Image: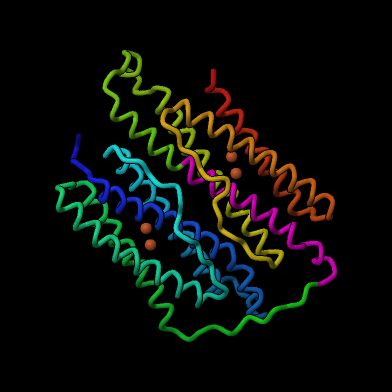
Amino acid sequence: MIVKATDEYFALLNRAVAREMEVSAQYMLQHTKMEKLKRKVIKENYLLESTTYDEFGKLLKDFAIEEMKHLAQILERIYLLGGEATTKPDKVVIGNSMREFAELDYKAEEEALELYRQLIEAAKNIGDRETWVLFTKIYSDEEVHLLKFQDYLEMESEPDLGETPDSEWRSIFGEEYIALLNKALASEISAIVQYTTQHEKAEGLERMRRKKIALEVVTGKNKASVVSGVLKETFLQEMEHMEKISERIYEIDRESIATVEPLPEIGNSVEDFIKLDRDAENYAIVLYRKVIAEATKLGDIKTKKLFEDIIQEEEEHYWGFDDFLP
Ligand SMILES: [Fe+2]
Ligand SMILES: [Fe+2]
Ligand SMILES: [Fe+2]
Ligand SMILES: [Fe+2]
């Protein structure tokens, strides 16, 4: 046992997990919405190489990736201390303008700093030095984020967005269809949470294991470490899927909804992980076939093409997991 972590301590760490999951999805989806805002606000934006929208959008994507890294580091710590991580993010709120993004994100960072001050204190109290070091580092990242949003909020607000009426061809994007696309988005978020968490848990399981066979000691490789690597590669691809699907939803001038569905399932052993992950890929493939069928029916060629590309990768993921099963 490294340090004796109490239930309250794990609860505090899990509040950090829920928060990091929320903000990484929030910033990523805001990033995908930028292009839509940019085109709506000032027509001249078309002519510019780079606008505030592009730069702010890039910043949000960078922040989203940083929050993902925080998430991974906190998960790693929880599993090393013998705890169990939550898979339920705090509520994601996206907003409708750059100013709203900045306001929502400023608030999120402020809450993070408050929580992390508590965590740093709690880690110190139980003598958990590594967690203390980790949150001291994360704290300074969040402070940088907060100051960026604050700087933005101190400037003038941007022009109001008017609603543009749909043209005839866009009338195909009805509520049910958008709900289906958001269901796809939700399954990507679910996969990201599941694979990230399992990746960190696999590493934790691996480090706590005492008995090793000679081949593993020599090569430093075994099933857990190989699966852990596969999971990492896979969740990076799911991140891209999530980004592309959300971008498409905003491109057709509709709204992304960040839910997590199905609920991620983590499991307790490497064998569990693989079975659950193959199920998750199966779920995605079945759902995306439906999206492709619907897109074909409506004549939404671009979405059809997007999901045809994604489904190929999901199938590769499926077989990748399947290979590990007996
Ligand atoms: Fe963070
Ligand atoms: Fe942050
Ligand atoms: Fe995916
Ligand atoms: Fe996948």
Q: Give the range drawn in magenta.
A: 167-195
Residue 265 in the image: above or below residue 111: above
The location of residue 184, given as percent across then percent down, is 64, 50
**Residue at left 43%, top 60%?**
63
The location of residue 239, given as percent across then percent down, is 54, 49
Judged left or right of residue 7, residue 60 is right
The location of residue 268, given as percent across then percent down, is 41, 31
Residue 271 in the image: above or below residue 303: above
The location of residue 85, given as percent across then percent down, is 38, 44
Q: How is the image coloured?
A: rainbow
Q: From the image, which quarter does the C terminus lie in?
A: top right
> Residue 204 colored magenta?
no
> Residue 186 colored magenta?
yes
Please tell me whether the stretch drawn in magenta is mainly helix, strand or loop: helix
Judged left or right of residue 63, residue 189 is right
**Residue at left 32%, top 14%?**
213
**Residue at left 22%, top 44%?**
5
The foreground one among 320 and 19 is 19
Quadrant assignment for ligand 4: top right
